[in-house]
Amino acid sequence: RPEVAVTVQLNIYDILGKNVWSSVKKMQTGESVSEEFEWDMKFSNGHDTFGGIFICRVLVTDANGSSSMISEKLRLMPQ
C-alpha cells in the first residue's frame, strides 16, 4: 500500500456537543505509522476539565478530499 499524505483532526466534545479541545496533524500513512495526540485534560481556554463524559472524534482526510471518521466516548473521573 503506498504512503499517502493525510490530515488527522482530533476533537474532544463535552456531552452537550461543545468543542472543548482540538488538534490537527499532517502525516503519512503506512504499514507501521504510529502518531500520538496528547490532551492535557484542559479546555481550550486553559481551565481544568471536570469529571464527566466526553466524545472523542477523529477525522482523517487525504489530499483528494476523501475522509473517514470515528467517534468514541471517554469517561473522565474527577481528580
Image (spheres, rainbow, N blue to C red):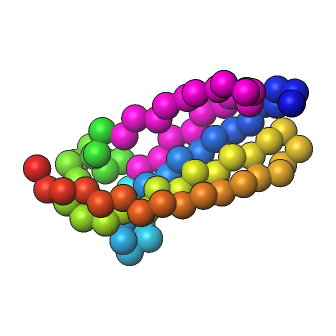
Q: Position of residue 41 (x, y in %)?
A: 28, 45
On the question of residue 68 being in view, the answer is: yes
- Queried whether the magenta region covers residue 53, the answer comes back as no
What residue do we see at 11% from left, 50% from top?
A: 79
Question: On screen, 3 above or below 40?
Answer: above
Q: Nearer the viewer, residue 13 or 28?
A: 28
Q: Can residue 19 be seen here? A: no
Spot occupied by residue 42 in the image (x, y as percentages of width and height): 28, 46
Q: In which quarter of the image is residue 26?
A: top right
Residue 28 colored in magenta in the image = yes
- Above or below residue 16? Residue 38 is above
Q: Residue visible at 31% across and 66% down?
A: 53
Q: In this view, does 42 lie to the left or right of 20?
A: left
Q: In which quarter of the image is the N terminus?
A: top right
User: For the view shown, which residue lies furthest in the bottom direction?
Assistant: 16
User: Which image quarter: residue 9?
Assistant: top right
Residue 64: image location, x then y, percent: 88, 44
Which residues fall within the magenta stretch?
21-39
Residue 2, image x, y percentages: 87, 27
Q: In this view, does 5 lie to the left or right of 15?
A: right
* Number of numbered discs on residues: 0
Give left or right: position of 60 versus 15.
right
On screen, residue 26 above or below 71: above
Q: Which residue is drawn at 18% across and 56% down?
A: 77
Q: Which residue lies furthest to the left in this view?
A: 79
